[in-house]
Image: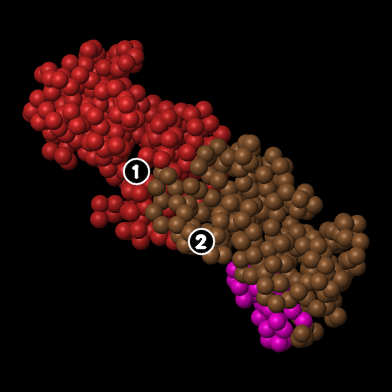
Chain colours: A brown, B red
Amino acid sequence: MTITGRTRLMAILGDPVAPLRSPALFNQAFARLGMDAAFLAFEVPAGELPAAWAGLTRLRNLDGLVVTMPHKEAVVPLLDALGPTARLTGTVNTVRRRPEGGWEGEMFDGEGFRDGLERAGHPVRGSAILQVGCGAAGRAIAHALARAGAARLLLHDASPGRAASLAGLLSGTYPGLSVAEGRPETMGQDIVVNATPLGLREGDPLPLEVSRLRPPQVVADVIPNPEETPLIAAARAAGCAVVTGRSMHEGQARLAAAYLGIAGWEG
Amino acid sequence: MTITGRTRLMAILGDPVAPLRSPALFNQAFARLGMDAAFLAFEVPAGELPAAWAGLTRLRNLDGLVVTMPHKEAVVPLLDALGPTARLTGTVNTVRRRPEGGWEGEMFDGEGFRDGLERAGHPVRGSAILQVGCGAAGRAIAHALARAGAARLLLHDASPGRAASLAGLLSGTYPGLSVAEGRPETMGQDIVVNATPLGLREGDPLPLEVSRLRPPQVVADVIPNPEETPLIAAARAAGCAVVTGRSMHEGQARLAAAYLGIAGWEG
């Protein structure tokens, strides 16, 4: 890849950016597809997004952005239009220019996660699921699991109000779903999902009690880096099938690439 | 080069950016030096610089910018500190973070041009020079030629007030220099300099009358792309030595790289 004045730009916006895998993933795709485009990471601290956004949207050769922590909610009021999942969840992870001017965003964390889970051989339809973490990514994941036909969803969040409010929203939106918020009990679950950031930093506590995990339970984590989180390691040790954050991330990237008009991603 | 979340960023800010050679030049240097850094082009239209600037300075992994048309004057009031040539010319082409916070800029167009001219074997000291074009780059070039000991400087600009004001400033700053503004007469000049943008776009008129160019006159152009401008072609046809905008650009890049802390640029 040679970057010149003609190279089109895309970027991921977050903080921290050092551990992000999107630049490598997208740049490999650009090289494979022969696209004269580069995918960068822009490190923007929380609270500085509005000013950064006003500036970045002035870059005429910037075609799209992937948005990650801590900006997935903060970017919403800065956009001119939202896709259906972004409206439902109040979060955005991918932003593109609109042909008529301005910028629009959509949220693919949830569908990316579901896609990764199902491609790994674990269908969501009819299953009982425990999900810990109801932040920006968690909200999108719970919506995607509900939409894909999960039978039961038990939600937990360190701040109980967050889990309850998401449970209320889901039960109103998906009448066929049995949804509750409460203690993160793994017993009786088919799939256990970590949607908290715990495991991202060394020394983080486990996001849930792992002592009663047993096959054929499936344990899925949203953290792509490190790929082997303590939760994933404990689940493997218990003999459970695991789906790492890498699968979710690859799913997100596929969907974000399609939204950004990158044709032929899966070659 | 593989861009990841850890890659440090630098960029050139201008409009248009497609013809710019800086990204290729800097990225080749980064590869040669084994630096995990990428050099991009950010296309920002005139008038949108203040908003773009406010945003770009929020990118924590952006370490420096090269500034080109049409922003070399407009960026000056946005900076926290200026180098000596920037103060003298009211123009900036390179910007870096200050260790104490904020951003500072300096202008290397003039010294880059002079460096390119002298490396090509044409000493400035004692020479008679015609320079057409007294815009941002032209002001910096005239200062560098004066500082390097030019004996006589004839300045011309399509807007005569610009040439006269630059001539006044130079005669006050460099008492040993004979400086005037007037018709762009090539006769009697050792060195003829185009510092206008004429030649950048196909179909541009020549920046000066070429019919009386003769060896051993030297003709130098600031336009790096196309390298063979109509002026350069006419000067070659007349048997004159030529120095193209590529030499100036390489000189600028050397000086900008040093200012941006890129060690070992010349291998």
Q: Which mark is residue A29?
A: 2
Q: CA distance from mark 2 to mark 1?
A: 25 Å
Q: Which residues are magenta?
A: A217-244
- Residue A265 in the image: state x and y as whole percent: 56, 61
User: Relative to A197, is B188 above or below?
Assistant: above
Q: Is residue A4 left or right of residue B127?
A: right
Camera-side residue: A42 or A4? A4
In front: mark 2 or mark 1?
Answer: 2
In the rendered image, residue A254 lying in the magenta stretch gets the answer no
- Residue A199 in the image: state x and y as whole percent: 66, 70
Q: Label 2 sits on what residue type?
A: Ala
Camera-side residue: B120 or B240? B240
Q: Which residue is mark 1?
A: B21
- Residue A164 in the image: state x and y as whole percent: 88, 60
User: Relative to B35, is B93 above or below?
Assistant: above
Which residue is at 19% across, 32% downward? B233
Q: Label 1 sits on what residue type?
A: Arg
Which residue is at 23% across, 22% downward? B131
